[in-house]
Image (cartoon, helix red, strand yellow):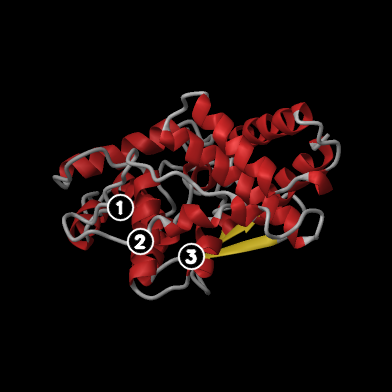
Amino acid sequence: MLEKEIEEYLGFLKKEKDISRNTELSYRGDLKKLDRFASGRGIRKAGDLDGALAEAFAAELREEGLSERTRARTLGCVRGFLAWLGESWRVSPSVAEDIRLPRTREGRVRILRPEEILGLVTAPDPSTGQGRRDRAILELLCSAGLRSAQLTALRVRDVDLQISCVVLRQKDGSERLLPFGERARRSLIRYLSAGRGRFRSPEDILFPARNGGQMSRQSLWKIVRKYALEAGIEGSVSPARLRATLAAELLDSGASLENVREIMGHADPSSTRRYKKQEADGKML
């Protein structure tokens, strides 16, 4: 009974938040679970969703024995969906507020320290074509907060060096701008002005694979991991961890939750809020 609203919401997230395909599939699964639960309770239209049903759904997840992290993810998705419905008064705006997310002890992310970021981005050898490419990749990941799929899909035309922004082009023709810093800008200029050496692409991909096609996300992860090891950074380092580090740094420097949420493309505000408080020891979130 919620199929129409679910598809509208996912369309909204793809357009406005540029969510990945994996995130879309995950959200669809969570929202269909809500749909089945509501239908089983005799709910026939979105306007009948209320706080009591939201509480009953949360209790159902607990009874299923799901981990706190899984329940928090599912309920966060549902809360975002209900808040979106509330904005157009298809449900009462208070319904989303009745959902309380469980406190999770899992999946804590270690945020990189400034000196570790500096060591990472300066690890590639700038005297080689590969080094210039890899440094530009690392600088852009650390400075713009791009997801792996976004970075590997970039074309040369998607980077505006005049205003220091990545231009993400949406399916509906609109554009979303992600700013990056001066250090990333200089690295991109060095990489592009050198003609990109052997890294050429008939499709004008910004960071192509050796065959000229689009780099895989696995290859990107290997690049990040390689230089993290060379920089002596402990623990697993991934593009997602670099995104988390940027989010924490922006909040720590005084950026608003809404601005950071927009830059990160988070659909659920709780995804951004988790980076607000940092612990002194290694900046564990």
Task: For residue 46, say whether it is visible.
Answer: yes
Tag 3: amino acid: Val
Marks 2 and 1 in Cβ contact (< 8 Å): yes
Residue 278, located in which quarter of the rendered image? bottom left
Please report whichever mark, 2 or 1, sits nearer to the chain's N-terminal start.
2
Residue 90, located in which quarter of the rendered image? bottom right
Left or right: residue 162 versus residue 21 is left
Closer to viewer: mark 3 or mark 1: 1
Question: Distance from label 3 to label 2 (Cα)?
Answer: 9 Å
Question: Distance from label 2 to label 1 (Cα)?
Answer: 9 Å
Q: Could you say where residue 61 lies in the image, as x and y percent from the top left? A: 54, 31
Compare residues 156 and 235 and report the one nearer the observer: 235
Examine the rendered structure and indicate whether residue 52 appears above or below residue 282: above
Report the residue that reaches farthest toward the left: 232
Q: Could you say where residue 108 lies in the image, as x and y percent from the top left? A: 31, 44
Identify the element where label 3 is drawn. helix
Tag 1: amino acid: Leu
The residue to which callout 1 is attached is: 285
Q: Could you say where residue 262 lies in the image, as x and y percent from the top left? A: 56, 63
The residue to which callout 2 is attached is: 248
Q: Quadrant of the N terminus?
A: top right
The residue to which callout 3 is attached is: 260
User: What's the residue at 33%, 34% (across, down)?
Assistant: 222
Please report whichever mark, 3 or 1, sits nearer to the chain's N-terminal start.
3
Q: Could you say where residue 22 lies in the image, as x and y percent from the top left? A: 57, 34
Left or right: residue 73 versus residue 55 is left
Report the residue that reaches farthest toward the front: 52
Marks 3 and 1 in Cβ contact (< 8 Å): no
Left or right: residue 83 versus residue 223 is right
Task: For residue 173, say whether it is visible.
Answer: no
> What crowding class fits label 2: few (fewer than 14 Cα within 10 Å), some (14-19), or many (20 or more)?
many
